[in-house]
Structures are given as C-alpha cells and as structure tokens.
Image (cartoon, helix red, strand yellow):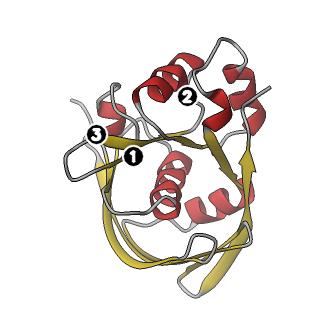
Amino acid sequence: MALGSTVHRFKVQLSDADRGVYEQLDLRAAQHPSETPAYLVTRLLAYCLSYEEGITFTQGLQNTEQPAIWIKTPDERTIAWIEIGTPSAERLHKASKACPRVIVYTHHDPQLLRREAARSAIHRIDQIEVFAPASTLVQQLVDRLERNITWELVRSGGQLYVTVAGTTVEGELQQLSLAP
C-alpha cells in the first residue's frame, strides 16, 4: 500500500526587509513520502522568500513537468519557475526557455548545483537566481518541524532569522551564480 502525503500547516509572520515584503501567511504544504524534511523546509523558505501575488505550491514531486513553486499572472502565464534542491542542467535549460525568471533554492552543497549546471548548455544561465540557506539553519528548522507550526521569518541584509516556539535560529542566505 502506498503512503500518502503528510500535510503541514505553517503560519508565517514574514518580514522581508531586503525586498520590502511584510505578510502574514497561512500555508498548507503536503510532504510527499519521498520528500525529505530538509527539502520541505527549503521549499517553505523558498515560498516565503519569493512571496508575491500569484505564488503557489504546485503538485511538485507528483508532477515532473512542474516546478516545486511557481508564480503566475491572473491570466495564468507563468512568470517565475522555482526549483528546490539540485535540478538537472536539462531541467534548468527547459525552465529558462519556458519562463522569464528561474530561481533555485538549494539545501545541498551549492557546488553540486554548479557541477550539474556545467554539464551542458543552459539557456540564460547568467539570469538564473540561486539561493542557498545555511545548512545549519535548515537543520535547526528540521529539528523543530511539526505538523502545525508558527514561524516568524525575518530577512535582513542577506541574513535569515526564524523564531520557532520562542527560539530564534539564524543563518546566511547565500546568493550564487551558475554562470562560469
């Protein structure tokens, strides 16, 4: 018998001073059985740190033709394709040809993503945005992961501060380039 997804509810007080975005978010994210907790945490960070009108979680791992997250206009045009982890060079090439903005949030060693990107030509590689939250931050959030959780997430000066149950964890949000 196949395992079903686990639904997590996140209440997030978002204060993104770097982008001037301040929102209260009430999110439900289904964790696919093959999805690691680190992937789920990074996916939630990606959603919050890319938040704008039209952002939604997709079917993700259940539909390989979709990114983990996308941003669409009211007329259903995809304007941002957001991947998590270490997507293949072929996937990044396809996304970059199909969408004006491609963003990757990786919870792995960023060098893995750079090596993958060097494997073959990627359309507009210099315009792909790559962010890597500190692995210690991701792990501390994984250690505090529950089915219902409240975060206070602050981004300021490239640093992330997340308060969970009265404890604040912090780490850098590194921005990288895939261009050689």
Residue 153 percent across, percent down from the top left:
55, 75
The kind of residue on which mark 3 rests is Gln
Label 3 sits on residue = 59
Residue 87: mark? 2
In the shown orientation, is residue 135 left or right of residue 88? right
Q: Are marks 2 and 3 in contact (CB under 8 Å)?
A: no
The kind of residue on which mark 2 rests is Pro
Disc on the earlier residue, 2 or 3 = 3
Secondary structure, mark 1, is: strand
User: How packed is label 2: few (under 14 Cα within 10 Å), some, or many (20 or more)?
Assistant: some
Label 1 sits on residue = 69
Q: Rounded to the nearest whole Å, what is the CA distance between mark 3 and mark 1? A: 9 Å
Position of 26 relative to 8 (above/below): below
In the shown orientation, is residue 153 left or right of residue 135? left
Q: Rounded to the nearest whole Å, what is the CA distance between mark 2 and mark 3? A: 16 Å
Secondary structure, mark 3, is: loop
Residue 108 percent across, percent down from the top left:
67, 40
